[in-house]
Amino acid sequence: MKFLDLAKVYIRSGGGGAGCISFRREKYIEYGGPDGGDGGNGGSVIAEAVDGLNTLIDFRYQQHFFAKNGQHGMGSQRTGKSGDDIILRLPVGTEILDEDEETVLVDMTEVGQRFVIAKGGNGGWGNLHFKSATNQAPRRANPGQEGIERTIWLRLKLIADVGLLGLPNAGKSTFLAATSNARPKIADYPFTTLVPNLGVVGVDNVEFVVADIPGLIDGASEGRGLGVLFLGHVERCAVLLHLIDGTSGDPVGDYRTIIQELEAYGGGLADKPRVTVLNKIDALDAEERAFLKEEIENETGVSLKLMSGASTEGTQDVLRALRSEIDDNRLREKKALEDPSEDEPWQP
Protein backbone atom coordinates (compact mmCIF):
# COMPACT_ATOMS: atom_id res chain seq x y z
CA MET A 1 0.00 0.00 0.00
CA LYS A 2 1.32 3.42 -0.93
CA PHE A 3 1.83 6.06 1.74
CA LEU A 4 -0.05 9.33 1.39
CA ASP A 5 -0.22 11.92 4.17
CA LEU A 6 -1.90 14.89 2.41
CA ALA A 7 -5.09 14.91 0.39
CA LYS A 8 -7.49 17.54 -0.97
CA VAL A 9 -11.17 16.62 -0.75
CA TYR A 10 -14.32 18.27 -2.08
CA ILE A 11 -17.47 17.69 -0.02
CA ARG A 12 -21.10 18.75 -0.15
CA SER A 13 -23.86 18.02 2.30
CA GLY A 14 -27.35 17.28 1.10
CA GLY A 15 -30.04 19.94 0.80
CA GLY A 16 -33.28 19.64 2.75
CA GLY A 17 -36.45 18.66 0.96
CA ALA A 18 -39.17 21.25 0.36
CA GLY A 19 -42.38 21.26 2.38
CA CYS A 20 -45.60 20.24 0.66
CA ILE A 21 -48.76 22.29 0.06
CA SER A 22 -51.62 19.83 0.19
CA PHE A 23 -55.23 19.64 1.37
CA ARG A 24 -57.14 16.59 2.54
CA ARG A 25 -59.61 15.44 -0.08
CA GLU A 26 -61.75 12.46 0.94
CA LYS A 27 -65.34 11.45 0.32
CA TYR A 28 -67.80 12.53 3.01
CA ILE A 29 -65.20 14.81 4.62
CA GLU A 30 -66.33 18.33 3.83
CA TYR A 31 -63.53 20.28 5.51
CA GLY A 32 -60.33 18.30 5.20
CA GLY A 33 -57.91 21.10 5.92
CA PRO A 34 -54.17 21.30 5.15
CA ASP A 35 -52.14 18.10 5.39
CA GLY A 36 -48.85 18.91 3.64
CA GLY A 37 -45.87 17.10 5.18
CA ASP A 38 -42.38 18.40 5.93
CA GLY A 39 -39.37 17.83 3.75
CA GLY A 40 -36.65 15.45 4.89
CA ASN A 41 -33.27 16.64 6.17
CA GLY A 42 -30.27 16.47 3.90
CA GLY A 43 -27.42 14.08 4.61
CA SER A 44 -24.32 15.31 6.45
CA VAL A 45 -20.64 14.68 5.70
CA ILE A 46 -19.03 13.18 8.82
CA ALA A 47 -15.39 12.35 9.54
CA GLU A 48 -14.64 9.35 11.75
CA ALA A 49 -11.29 8.15 13.08
CA VAL A 50 -10.97 4.39 12.68
CA ASP A 51 -8.38 1.82 13.66
CA GLY A 52 -6.28 -0.08 11.14
CA LEU A 53 -5.46 2.75 8.72
CA ASN A 54 -2.13 4.56 8.45
CA THR A 55 -2.39 6.30 5.08
CA LEU A 56 -4.77 8.56 3.14
CA ILE A 57 -4.29 6.66 -0.12
CA ASP A 58 -8.06 6.07 -0.47
CA PHE A 59 -8.54 9.80 -1.01
CA ARG A 60 -6.19 9.87 -3.98
CA TYR A 61 -8.68 7.88 -6.07
CA GLN A 62 -11.84 9.55 -4.82
CA GLN A 63 -11.83 13.23 -3.92
CA HIS A 64 -15.52 14.13 -4.23
CA PHE A 65 -18.07 13.19 -1.57
CA PHE A 66 -21.66 14.40 -1.98
CA ALA A 67 -24.36 13.48 0.54
CA LYS A 68 -27.93 12.79 -0.60
CA ASN A 69 -30.65 15.44 -0.58
CA GLY A 70 -33.72 15.08 1.58
CA GLN A 71 -36.96 14.02 -0.06
CA HIS A 72 -39.76 16.55 -0.50
CA GLY A 73 -42.78 16.42 1.80
CA MET A 74 -46.00 14.79 0.58
CA GLY A 75 -49.71 14.94 1.22
CA SER A 76 -51.49 13.07 4.00
CA GLN A 77 -48.98 14.53 6.48
CA ARG A 78 -46.15 12.41 5.08
CA THR A 79 -42.63 13.63 5.85
CA GLY A 80 -39.99 13.16 3.19
CA LYS A 81 -37.15 10.70 3.74
CA SER A 82 -33.91 12.19 5.08
CA GLY A 83 -30.80 11.90 2.94
CA ASP A 84 -28.10 9.39 3.90
CA ASP A 85 -24.97 10.68 5.61
CA ILE A 86 -21.52 10.14 4.11
CA ILE A 87 -18.78 9.04 6.52
CA LEU A 88 -15.12 9.69 5.73
CA ARG A 89 -13.08 7.01 7.50
CA LEU A 90 -9.73 8.51 8.47
CA PRO A 91 -6.60 7.20 10.19
CA VAL A 92 -6.11 8.24 13.79
CA GLY A 93 -3.92 11.34 13.84
CA THR A 94 -5.51 13.05 10.83
CA GLU A 95 -5.96 16.81 10.92
CA ILE A 96 -8.83 18.32 8.94
CA LEU A 97 -7.93 21.75 7.61
CA ASP A 98 -9.91 24.45 5.87
CA GLU A 99 -9.23 25.39 2.26
CA ASP A 100 -6.43 27.79 3.29
CA GLU A 101 -4.39 24.78 4.56
CA GLU A 102 -3.75 26.63 7.84
CA THR A 103 -6.99 26.68 9.84
CA VAL A 104 -7.34 23.37 11.70
CA LEU A 105 -10.99 22.39 11.95
CA VAL A 106 -10.41 19.30 14.08
CA ASP A 107 -7.63 16.91 15.07
CA MET A 108 -8.76 13.28 15.00
CA THR A 109 -6.65 11.77 17.79
CA GLU A 110 -8.85 8.97 19.19
CA VAL A 111 -10.45 5.90 17.66
CA GLY A 112 -14.16 6.45 17.23
CA GLN A 113 -13.95 10.24 17.31
CA ARG A 114 -16.48 11.90 14.99
CA PHE A 115 -16.78 15.38 13.54
CA VAL A 116 -19.49 16.82 11.30
CA ILE A 117 -17.62 18.61 8.52
CA ALA A 118 -20.72 19.76 6.62
CA LYS A 119 -24.18 19.51 8.18
CA GLY A 120 -27.10 18.65 5.94
CA GLY A 121 -29.79 21.23 5.29
CA ASN A 122 -33.03 21.15 7.28
CA GLY A 123 -36.21 20.11 5.53
CA GLY A 124 -38.85 22.77 4.87
CA TRP A 125 -42.16 22.89 6.69
CA GLY A 126 -45.33 21.83 4.90
CA ASN A 127 -48.49 23.94 4.99
CA LEU A 128 -49.79 21.89 7.94
CA HIS A 129 -47.36 23.83 10.15
CA PHE A 130 -48.91 27.17 9.17
CA LYS A 131 -52.51 26.31 10.10
CA SER A 132 -54.03 28.63 12.71
CA ALA A 133 -57.40 29.85 13.87
CA THR A 134 -57.20 32.81 11.54
CA ASN A 135 -55.57 31.00 8.63
CA GLN A 136 -57.22 27.62 8.32
CA ALA A 137 -56.24 26.99 4.70
CA PRO A 138 -52.63 28.20 4.35
CA ARG A 139 -51.13 27.97 0.91
CA ARG A 140 -47.57 28.37 2.12
CA ALA A 141 -44.67 25.96 2.60
CA ASN A 142 -40.96 26.44 3.23
CA PRO A 143 -38.27 25.35 0.80
CA GLY A 144 -35.56 23.10 2.14
CA GLN A 145 -32.30 24.56 3.40
CA GLU A 146 -29.41 24.24 0.96
CA GLY A 147 -26.46 22.01 1.70
CA ILE A 148 -22.94 23.19 2.45
CA GLU A 149 -20.25 22.87 -0.19
CA ARG A 150 -16.60 23.24 0.81
CA THR A 151 -13.05 22.14 0.09
CA ILE A 152 -10.96 20.65 2.88
CA TRP A 153 -7.46 19.26 3.30
CA LEU A 154 -6.63 16.07 5.17
CA ARG A 155 -3.18 15.97 6.73
CA LEU A 156 -2.00 12.82 8.48
CA LYS A 157 0.44 12.99 11.38
CA LEU A 158 1.30 9.52 12.57
CA ILE A 159 0.91 8.96 16.29
CA ALA A 160 4.01 7.36 17.80
CA ASP A 161 5.86 7.45 21.12
CA VAL A 162 9.35 7.82 19.64
CA GLY A 163 10.51 9.63 16.52
CA LEU A 164 13.78 8.70 14.79
CA LEU A 165 15.95 11.56 13.54
CA GLY A 166 19.30 11.66 11.77
CA LEU A 167 21.12 12.29 8.54
CA PRO A 168 20.65 9.83 5.66
CA ASN A 169 22.44 6.53 6.36
CA ALA A 170 22.63 7.21 10.10
CA GLY A 171 21.18 3.74 10.71
CA LYS A 172 17.58 4.63 11.59
CA SER A 173 15.94 1.90 9.52
CA THR A 174 18.51 -0.66 10.71
CA PHE A 175 17.67 0.20 14.32
CA LEU A 176 13.93 -0.10 13.65
CA ALA A 177 14.38 -3.47 11.92
CA ALA A 178 16.61 -4.78 14.74
CA THR A 179 14.26 -3.83 17.56
CA SER A 180 10.81 -4.41 16.03
CA ASN A 181 8.94 -6.53 13.50
CA ALA A 182 8.97 -3.68 10.97
CA ARG A 183 10.86 -4.39 7.76
CA PRO A 184 11.87 -1.06 6.24
CA LYS A 185 14.07 -0.98 3.18
CA ILE A 186 17.77 -0.88 4.12
CA ALA A 187 20.58 -0.06 1.68
CA ASP A 188 23.98 1.63 1.61
CA TYR A 189 22.89 4.78 -0.23
CA PRO A 190 21.20 7.98 1.02
CA PHE A 191 17.43 8.35 1.14
CA THR A 192 16.68 4.64 1.13
CA THR A 193 13.69 5.52 3.31
CA LEU A 194 11.22 7.48 1.20
CA VAL A 195 8.15 7.31 3.45
CA PRO A 196 7.67 7.02 7.23
CA ASN A 197 7.66 3.57 8.82
CA LEU A 198 6.12 2.49 12.11
CA GLY A 199 7.39 -0.28 14.36
CA VAL A 200 6.26 -1.63 17.72
CA VAL A 201 9.23 -2.00 20.06
CA GLY A 202 9.22 -3.98 23.31
CA VAL A 203 11.52 -3.70 26.33
CA ASP A 204 10.99 -5.11 29.84
CA ASN A 205 7.44 -6.26 28.91
CA VAL A 206 6.45 -2.74 27.82
CA GLU A 207 5.67 -1.86 24.21
CA PHE A 208 5.79 1.50 22.45
CA VAL A 209 5.62 2.74 18.86
CA VAL A 210 8.63 4.10 16.97
CA ALA A 211 8.32 6.23 13.81
CA ASP A 212 11.17 6.25 11.27
CA ILE A 213 11.12 9.17 8.82
CA PRO A 214 13.39 9.93 5.85
CA GLY A 215 16.76 11.44 6.72
CA LEU A 216 17.32 15.16 7.04
CA ILE A 217 20.06 17.08 5.29
CA ASP A 218 21.45 20.58 5.60
CA GLY A 219 18.88 23.00 4.20
CA ALA A 220 15.93 20.62 4.64
CA SER A 221 13.82 23.43 6.14
CA GLU A 222 14.32 25.35 2.88
CA GLY A 223 13.05 22.49 0.74
CA ARG A 224 16.15 20.35 0.20
CA GLY A 225 15.79 16.59 0.47
CA LEU A 226 12.72 14.73 1.72
CA GLY A 227 12.84 14.78 5.48
CA VAL A 228 11.17 18.15 6.08
CA LEU A 229 8.06 16.86 4.30
CA PHE A 230 7.63 14.25 6.99
CA LEU A 231 8.79 16.08 10.12
CA GLY A 232 5.14 16.61 11.02
CA HIS A 233 4.95 12.89 11.80
CA VAL A 234 7.22 13.30 14.83
CA GLU A 235 5.43 16.37 16.21
CA ARG A 236 3.23 14.13 18.37
CA CYS A 237 6.07 11.97 19.68
CA ALA A 238 6.90 12.01 23.38
CA VAL A 239 10.66 11.70 22.77
CA LEU A 240 13.04 11.96 19.82
CA LEU A 241 15.84 9.47 19.19
CA HIS A 242 18.70 11.29 17.48
CA LEU A 243 21.13 8.90 15.78
CA ILE A 244 24.63 10.05 14.83
CA ASP A 245 26.72 8.03 12.38
CA GLY A 246 29.87 6.93 14.21
CA THR A 247 31.69 6.36 10.93
CA SER A 248 31.09 9.94 9.77
CA GLY A 249 34.08 12.21 9.53
CA ASP A 250 32.35 15.02 11.43
CA PRO A 251 29.86 13.68 14.02
CA VAL A 252 29.65 17.03 15.84
CA GLY A 253 28.75 18.79 12.59
CA ASP A 254 26.15 16.11 11.86
CA TYR A 255 24.57 16.67 15.28
CA ARG A 256 24.39 20.42 14.81
CA THR A 257 22.89 20.06 11.32
CA ILE A 258 19.91 18.12 12.68
CA ILE A 259 19.39 20.52 15.61
CA GLN A 260 19.45 23.51 13.25
CA GLU A 261 16.82 21.92 11.02
CA LEU A 262 14.59 21.17 14.03
CA GLU A 263 14.83 24.78 15.17
CA ALA A 264 14.14 26.07 11.66
CA TYR A 265 11.10 23.81 11.28
CA GLY A 266 9.54 24.97 14.56
CA GLY A 267 6.46 23.25 15.94
CA GLY A 268 8.21 22.72 19.28
CA LEU A 269 10.38 19.90 17.91
CA ALA A 270 13.63 21.42 19.20
CA ASP A 271 12.20 21.53 22.73
CA LYS A 272 11.13 17.89 22.87
CA PRO A 273 13.07 15.45 25.07
CA ARG A 274 15.84 13.77 23.07
CA VAL A 275 18.00 10.70 23.50
CA THR A 276 21.22 11.18 21.53
CA VAL A 277 23.03 8.04 20.37
CA LEU A 278 26.30 7.40 18.56
CA ASN A 279 25.42 4.59 16.16
CA LYS A 280 27.53 2.06 14.20
CA ILE A 281 30.04 1.52 17.04
CA ASP A 282 30.61 -2.02 15.71
CA ALA A 283 32.91 -0.36 13.15
CA LEU A 284 34.93 1.42 15.89
CA ASP A 285 37.48 0.08 18.36
CA ALA A 286 37.42 0.94 22.07
CA GLU A 287 39.79 3.89 21.72
CA GLU A 288 37.76 5.48 18.89
CA ARG A 289 34.52 5.03 20.81
CA ALA A 290 35.91 6.75 23.91
CA PHE A 291 37.40 9.60 21.85
CA LEU A 292 34.22 10.29 19.87
CA LYS A 293 32.01 10.08 22.96
CA GLU A 294 34.17 12.59 24.83
CA GLU A 295 34.43 14.92 21.84
CA ILE A 296 30.67 15.02 21.15
CA GLU A 297 29.73 15.46 24.80
CA ASN A 298 32.25 18.28 25.27
CA GLU A 299 31.20 20.10 22.10
CA THR A 300 27.43 19.72 22.45
CA GLY A 301 26.84 19.29 26.17
CA VAL A 302 24.51 16.30 25.67
CA SER A 303 24.72 12.92 27.36
CA LEU A 304 25.66 10.42 24.66
CA LYS A 305 24.86 6.73 24.45
CA LEU A 306 26.68 4.18 22.29
CA MET A 307 24.88 1.66 20.11
CA SER A 308 25.09 -0.52 17.05
CA GLY A 309 21.83 -1.24 15.28
CA ALA A 310 23.48 -3.85 13.06
CA SER A 311 24.95 -5.93 15.93
CA THR A 312 22.28 -4.83 18.47
CA GLU A 313 25.03 -3.85 20.91
CA GLY A 314 23.68 -1.26 23.36
CA THR A 315 20.16 -1.27 21.90
CA GLN A 316 18.54 -2.43 25.15
CA ASP A 317 20.06 0.49 27.08
CA VAL A 318 18.77 2.90 24.45
CA LEU A 319 15.28 1.35 24.57
CA ARG A 320 15.21 1.63 28.36
CA ALA A 321 16.22 5.29 28.14
CA LEU A 322 13.42 5.90 25.65
CA ARG A 323 10.91 4.12 27.85
CA SER A 324 11.95 6.27 30.83
CA GLU A 325 11.44 9.46 28.81
CA ILE A 326 8.02 8.24 27.61
CA ASP A 327 6.96 7.51 31.21
CA ASP A 328 8.17 10.94 32.35
CA ASN A 329 6.21 12.60 29.54
CA ARG A 330 3.02 10.75 30.50
CA LEU A 331 3.47 11.82 34.12
CA ARG A 332 3.89 15.44 33.02
CA GLU A 333 0.73 15.26 30.91
CA LYS A 334 -1.22 13.68 33.77
CA LYS A 335 -0.02 16.33 36.22
CA ALA A 336 -0.93 19.09 33.78
CA LEU A 337 -4.46 17.72 33.52
CA GLU A 338 -4.87 17.35 37.28
CA ASP A 339 -3.07 20.62 38.21
CA PRO A 340 -3.96 23.36 35.70
CA SER A 341 -1.72 26.41 35.73
CA GLU A 342 -2.76 29.27 38.00
CA ASP A 343 -2.08 31.65 35.15
CA GLU A 344 -4.94 30.25 33.12
CA PRO A 345 -8.20 32.23 33.35
CA TRP A 346 -10.98 30.71 35.41
CA GLN A 347 -13.74 29.03 33.48
CA PRO A 348 -17.09 27.72 34.75
Image (cartoon, rainbow, N blue to C red):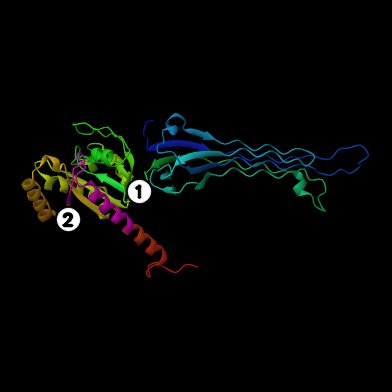
Give the percent coordinates (x, y) of residue 44: 57, 42
Label 2 vs label 1: CA separation? 24 Å
**Is residue 282 rendered to the left or right of residue 159?**
left
Between 161 and 125, which is closer to the camera in this rendering?
161
Q: Image check: 124 left or right of 279?
A: right
Which residue is under mark 2? Answer: 303
Q: State whether residue 63 appears in this view.
A: yes
Looking at the image, can residue 261 be seen? no
Residue that carries the numbered disc 1 in the rendered image: 207
Dot 1 falls on a residue whose secondary structure is: strand
The vertical placement of 11 against 335, above or below, is: above
Q: Is residue 57 above or below residue 269?
A: above
Assign a secondary structure to mark 2: loop
Q: Position of residue 300 (x, y in %)?
A: 13, 54
Residue at figure coordinates x 86%, y 38% from the top left: 25
The front one of 194 and 66 is 194
Q: Which quadrant: the N terminus? A: top left
Question: Label 2: how many residues lie within 10 Å, few (<14), some (14-19) or many (20+)?
Answer: some
Q: Magenta segment, which residues? A: 305-327
Percent x, y for residue 207? 35, 48
